C-alpha cells in the first residue's frame, strides 16, 4: 500500500477543471516513461480529486462526462500519462541522482577508450559530463539519455560503445563450476572441453565489463585461469 506521506499529486487540466490523483513518485515516473507499471500498485487513494489537498472528490458521473469512463484506475492512468507530476524538491533530487547513476553505469559497462581498448571508470565519465555541461532529464529513459550523453562527452574523452571477445582457459579443477558462471556473465561464442578436463571458450561481452570478467574468472579459479583479449 502506498503511504500518503510519500505520495505526490499527478494533475491534468481538462476544460475549466483540474483532475488530480495521489500516486507513488518512483512508479509514477516509470509509468510516464512508458515502462509497464500496474496503476493499482502506485495509487495511494482509489479516487480522483478536483483538489487532492482539500479532499474534493470527483463524482463518478463527472468522470464519465469528462473521460468517457467512471473507472478510477483508467482515469488515474490517463491523468498520470498525460498530465503533470508534482514532485517535491527532495523527490526530484533523489530521482535525478538515481537516473544520473544509471546513465553513468550503463556507459561504463558498455564503452571503452578506443585508443587503449580499456574501460572508462565511472568517475571519468561523470567528470566528462560535468565538463560538457550535459544535464540529465528525470523524465526521459536511460537509453535515450545515454545516447545524448555519449554525443556530448565524445569531444572531451575518446569513447565508443563496443563489444569484445575474450579467450579463456579454465583448469579442470574449476571448470565445472566456472562454466555456469562464465556462461551467465557473457555470451559463449565457442567452447570445448579438453582431454585434461580443462575448459576453453571464447566469450563476448560489452567492452566496459572486461575488468569485471577478469575479476570473476580469477575469483573462480584462484588466479589459475588464462585469458586473452582477442
Image (tube, rainbow, N blue to C red):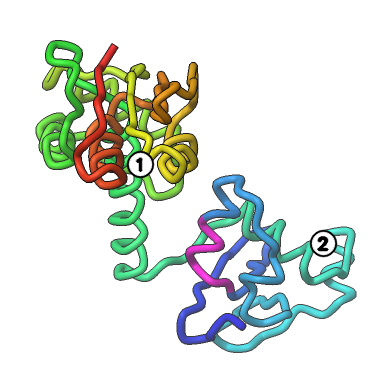
Write the residue at 27% across / 40% down.
Answer: 104
Question: Residue 61 placed where, x, y %?
Answer: 89, 74
Q: Position of residue 195 (x, y in %)?
A: 44, 22
User: Residue 172 falls in which quadrant of the image?
Assistant: top left
Left or right of 223, for residue 68: right
Image vertical order of residue 166 relative to residue 71, above or below? above
Q: Farthest front residue?
A: 196
Residue 174 sits in quarter? top left
Image quarter of the C terminus:
top left
* Real-space Cα separation, disc 2 to disc 1, in angstroms: 70 Å
Magenta residues span 23-29
Which sits in the foreground, 68 or 73? 73
Q: Could you say whether the residue bearing mark 1 is in a helix, strand or loop?
A: helix
Rendering coords of residue 168 (x, y %): 33, 24
The numbered mark at residue 117 is: none
- Does the magenta-highlighted stretch encompass residue 7? no
Amino acid at each position: 500500500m502506498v503511504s500518503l506521506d510519500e505520495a505526490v499529486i499527478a494533475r491534468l487540466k481538462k476544460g475549466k477543471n483540474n483532475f488530480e490523483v495521489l500516486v507513488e513518485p518512483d512508479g509514477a515516473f516509470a509509468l510516464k516513461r512508458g515502462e509497464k507499471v500496474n496503476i493499482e500498485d502506485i495509487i495511494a487513494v482509489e479516487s480522483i480529486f478536483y483538489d487532492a489537498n482539500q479532499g474534493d472528490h470527483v463524482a463518478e458521473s463527472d468522470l464519465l462526462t469528462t473521460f468517457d469512463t467512471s473507472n478510477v484506475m483508467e482515469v488515474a492512468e490517463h491523468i498520470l500519462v498525460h498530465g503533470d507530476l508534482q514532485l517535491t524538491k527532495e523527490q526530484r533530487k533523489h530521482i535525478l541522482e538515481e537516473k544520473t547513476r544509471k546513465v553513468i553505469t550503463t556507459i561504463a559497462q558498455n564503452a571503452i577508450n578506443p585508443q587503449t581498448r580499456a574501460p572508462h571508470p565511472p568517475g571519468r565519465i561523470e567528470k566528462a559530463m560535468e565538463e560538457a555541461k550535459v544535464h540529465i532529464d528525470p523524465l526521459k529513459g536511460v537509453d535515450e539519455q545515454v545516447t545524448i550523453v555519449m554525443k556530448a562527452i565524445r569531444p572531451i574523452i575518446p569513447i565508443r560503445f563496443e563489444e569484445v571477445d575474450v579467450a579463456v582457459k579454465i583448469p579442470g579443477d574449476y571448470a565445472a563450476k566456472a562454466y555456469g558462471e562464465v556462461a551467465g556473465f557473457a555470451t559463449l561464442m565457442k567452447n570445448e572441453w579438453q582431454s585434461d578436463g580443462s575448459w576453453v571458450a571464447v566469450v563476448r561481452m560489452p567492452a566496459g565489463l572486461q575488468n569485471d570478467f577478469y575479476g570473476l574468472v580469477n575469483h573462480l579459479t584462484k588466479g589459475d585461469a588464462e585469458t586473452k583479449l582477442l
